[in-house]
Amino acid sequence: MDSQHHQQPLGGSRQPPQGQHQHHQQQHPQQLHLHQQGYYYQSPYQHYQQQPLEEEEEEEEDDDKVEETQQQQQQHQQEQQAPAGDDGRPASSDAPSPQAADSSSDDGLDEAYADSTGEGEMMGDDTKTLSTDRTMRLQYDQQDLAHHMYLLTLDGKLHLAPISNPQEILDVGTGTGIWAIDIADEYPSAKVTGVDLSPIQPSLLPPNCTFEVDDVTLCPWTYPQNHFDFIHVREMFGCIPDWDEFFQQCYQCLKPGGYIEMVEHSVEPTSDDGSVGPSHFYTLWGKTVVEAGATFGKSFTIWKESKERLKRAGFVDVVEIEYKWPMNGWNKDPKLRELGRWNQVRLHGGVEGYMLRLLTTALRWPYEEAQLFLAQMRTTLRDYKTNAYLPGTIVYARKPTDES
């Protein structure tokens, strides 16, 4: 986000609505293609049986987790019987925890996401209708979950660029504004500006934090040249049509000596042990996302291109740090295991929010076929035998003080 180059790892079920399965009696071409490759539809409302972990030394731990999940289910049932709050949900409803996200119980996984988004209330009998409000809500919830995951990845740090006493900070694609608010608290003397297409940020803010509605794909930017000490860009993959032009705008608006930091990850799950092969569903998933983005003229591969593109834009002291996000809790490393559990919750609930439009609009898939594809992704996320992860990079670079 090259004289320096570091590559170091950082470390209750619902019944389907009446007639739900009638949509799948007729196979569409893409559905037939999936069936030929061994992928079969499973209803997203169906309760899945979790595959047991293979490590013998984890059996006792899993038993404890199952018991803990059962306790959580009992608590959840009690909450459902409790008086409802102003929003219609139980007044004692709590936010999800990593334990609730543990896939040793699929009910725990479903509850963790339903509690965090209210999905159980938003799902109606008409599964062919997905409101824009719900789609956007799913995306915003995933942004906040991702923020927690980045803090875990960076050991609580909000950035890696060596900035000191910044006075002007720009957060591009701020989303819910969670990073901008946190950085404003960390640097109370700095003025933090978050920019996004959607005005969905909270109204209660630190005095040094403001938000603007703007489109950063429109050039030139309206910000003054040589203005910002730090520009932060996170998870903008699939949003920028021309990354070279984008980096030129960042370069012009940064002060000499200022830093830019790019935080991106892949959308194509992979593995180090070959468990994600060419015929694996994760491979098909990744290729489909990239293909859909290309249809809109948007790239999902910036995570592995940032370093070279920043150098081409004139930045110096480019540093790249690699990280991995497991697709679920398969990893034995405690930190990666927790990251995997959170990632599973994030993807399990978020795939519909950001993929349904791509599939039905960009690739023109029928709605039923798109839901089949998303359901298969949710099923695959429960496979602990596949050591899959999403690779990512954090790249930071400095604008030279002597532009000559």
Image (cartoon, helix red, strand yellow):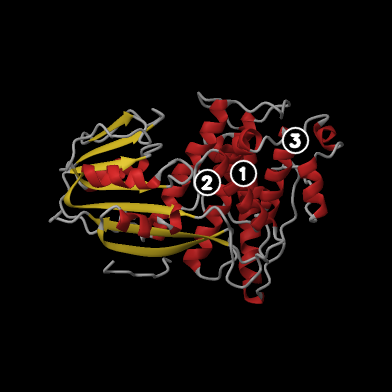
Quarter of the picture holding the N terminus: bottom left
Earlier along the polypeptide chain: callout 2 or callout 3? 2
- Residue at image coords 31%, 53%: 261
Residue 277 shown left or right of residue 230 in the figure: right
Determine which quarter of the picture holds residue 294: top right
Task: Please say whether residue 75 is visible from this viewpoint.
Answer: no
Q: Which residue is mark 2?
A: 96
CA–CA distance in space, label 2 to label 3: 30 Å
- Residue at image coords 31%, 37%: 194
What numbered label is drawn on residue 396? none
Q: Mark 1, mark 3: which one is toward the viewer? A: 3
Classify 164 as above or below 43.
Answer: below
Element under disc 3: helix
- In the displayed orientation, state which residue is furthest to the front: 404
Instruction: Give the x, y percent position of residue 67.
Output: 65, 58
Q: Which residue is mark 3?
A: 368
Q: Are circles 1 and 3 on residues that touch, CB within 8 Å?
A: no
Instruction: Give the x, y percent position of residue 165.
Output: 15, 51
Q: Are circles 1 and 2 on residues that touch, CB within 8 Å?
A: yes
Q: Are circles 2 and 3 on residues that touch, CB within 8 Å?
A: no
Earlier along the polypeptide chain: callout 1 or callout 2? 2
- Residue at image coords 80%, 33%: 20
Classify 388 as above or below 313.
Answer: below
Q: Amino acid at mark 3?
A: Glu
